[in-house]
Amino acid sequence: PRMPGLRTTTLLGIAACGAAALSGPASALARWPTARALQRPAVLWLRAGSSASMSAPSGPPDAKLAALRAEMARAGVGALVVPSGDAHLSEYVHPHYDRRAFVSGFTGSAGTALVTPDRALLWTDGRYFLQAERELGSEWSLMRAGEPEVPTLHQWVAEHLPAGTGVGIDPHVFSVDEAQALETALAGAGRQLSMIPMVGPNLVDTVWGDGSSSWPRAPPPTGHALSVPLHHSGLGRVAKISSAAAAARAQGAGALLVCMLDEVGWLLNLRGRDVPHCPVLQGFVLVHTGGEGQREAGGGRAGAAGDGSARSGAPPPPAVYPAATLFVDETKISPELAAELAADGVEVLSYGQIQPAIEAVVAAGKGVMLDPNKVTYALRRAAGSSAIERPSPLSLPKSIKNEAEIEAMVAAHRADGAALATFFCWLERRVCTEGGTVDEKEIAKRVAAARASFGAFDLSFPTIAGVGANGAIIHYDCSKADNPAVFDGSQMLLLDSGGQYSGGTTDVTRTIHMGTPTPWQRQMFTRVLKGNIGLDSTLFPDGTPGMAIDAFARAALWQVGLDYLHGTGHGVGAGLNVHEGPQSISARYGNQVGLRAGMICSNEPGYYEQGAFGIRIENLLIVRKRQTAHAMPGRNFLGFDQLTHVPIQKSLMDVSLLTAAEVEWINSYHGRVWAQVSPLLPEEDYSEARQWLRTATAPISSPLAERAAALVPGPPVCATA
């Protein structure tokens, strides 16, 4: 999907080392094209920090940079940091707040810009290197984050800025952790460098304006809020607020500050349309722990709709009012929803009142609990010495789905599988039967239409439809392409897409070829598939961090000296954001969050050959408890169940590279796809798509699998305690 995570690997495609340096079975090496590294120099890894990435600008002056530098001079700052996020530190932001994209031209979801009087630099990770090369203007230098010899932004400013320089930030779009790390780096340089939290309008906004000048700007979001029914949320907002208040109370706080939009939505069982493809509502929440300044809840609210508080087994309404305060554009809250929220102890105030409300909590002598990684520096400063910095008590409960959330996600993925079956059936008819072609933008439109026909109300992220070389751009957005590539079946097509359904969020990647793929393409596809199967099949102790199992997805590529420059898996929200923490599966050692039953993760190994093609195979998985042959006291084991039910193209598989167990996995998976999806494709309405699905899920065989089936079962060769 839209994969998270920095990777610090040093290979994009083929290492220029020859077969002698490669590890792995002799059979794999025998098939290895030993001269390929020399034949394809374009895929060799390019290091940032080289003269190529730091070259002097050429071409016409950048008018946006010139205007921004003028504003910086007026404000008295010698450098300005422009991050990706908004006032809620969102990964994906509404276009009105996409300041980094405006000033740099780079439209990826992750990156930070630094502007000085004579330099403009953009840091981003391996998912976006190729995209940034295409989008950045001639005055910009691309800093390939995580690569050898590439300084971090903090290292660069500490080393290169003149003594006495003030570095400006907008504290309303910087997290506490980010601001403090920058401040520490500047102070440590020993040259009177300083961070300046700027007061007044964001300098980029001053240049950008309201869209009526030279540069268009989308108006702020105005969508209405919606309440999530209890049969999708599985837990009412009264219970969630009560748990959050208890967590804050245990830390000695009088209030808990919630800033991240997905946490706001999960906590209050609300959804909105304020960020494209993310069903979130732009707002803040203060959860109150009780005491002075709150009043007893009125008796008339006990049976209100929305939370189900008065229904069987549900917790009673809060004993104090407000139990929580939602700060939001009040025009987004209908009278009916306002009454529902009030019944559950939620007060609604205007969006701009959040800072005065924090100051009021502080003035009352109470502490404000906040997560320094999820709250802006401006709001942290408002809390002052009353801030109690702790990890968010909402992050882990939100990531562990209850059975109602899982049921809604399963239903969404069954519908998604049916939608993609109809799409791939259409694409095969268009290209193979009719001899037609289709460009990337039409592919994206057709995928969206197919999902809409099965109940999706939005995409879960902009569709990645990369034909040929565009598939090697990990987060390629075909909607921004001036000349989208045309698919005629003879190239690889990487299609990464997802939908938002009622209660469920989907994210799936399939790579297809409708002609005759080369042996090299089939080998790479099969190695990626082996990685997907390897991770899917592993068992691990409860609480194992994702970094400990990441290698299962990479092993088949590592055996021949290859890798991919992104994480293997990210969390996914239940009818929320397609990227969700705190869990992940990647080689990043910093994320030690253990995997727990009920979490949802993606499984998406890949291979990308610059200028040629890209391959990725992605399923979403639910972490589930597993029964094992043996048991250790106090140690439970977990595994994965598949959510995604979309066929994997069999003609791209090199079955000679597959083990008997892998062939069995493929056949079992396709059997489940047929069982789950075919009931949604009745013969009378979807005869063609149903037949396509039947063919796509038919079993495969291989010599290894046939020999294994003929063996007489016997005792294991060895066993360990």
Image (cartoon, rainbow, N blue to C red):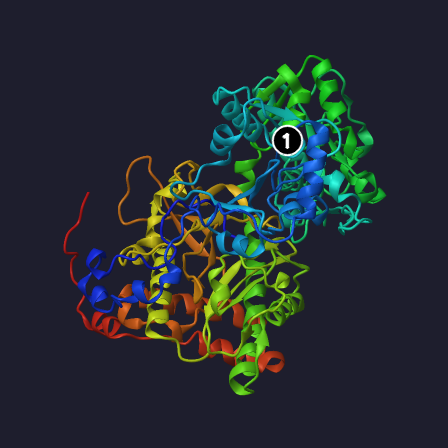
In-front residue for pair 199/441: 199
Identify the secondary structure beneath mark 1. strand
Outermost residue to the top: 365
Q: Is residue 177 visible?
A: yes
User: Does residue 706 appear to the left or right of 153 in the view shown?
Assistant: left
In the image, what residue type sits under mark 1?
Ile
Q: Position of residue 235 (x, y in %)?
A: 62, 41
> Where, quadrant-wise, is the C terminus in this rendering?
top left
Q: Is residue 598 visible?
A: no
Q: Position of residue 177 (x, y in %)?
A: 55, 29
Residue at (82% x, 39% y) in the render: 330
Q: Position of residue 579 (x, y in %)?
A: 55, 48
Q: Position of residue 593 (x, y in %)?
A: 44, 37
Outermost residue to the bottom: 434
In-front residue for pair 461/95: 95
User: Does residue 467 appear to the left or right of 384 in the view shown?
Assistant: left
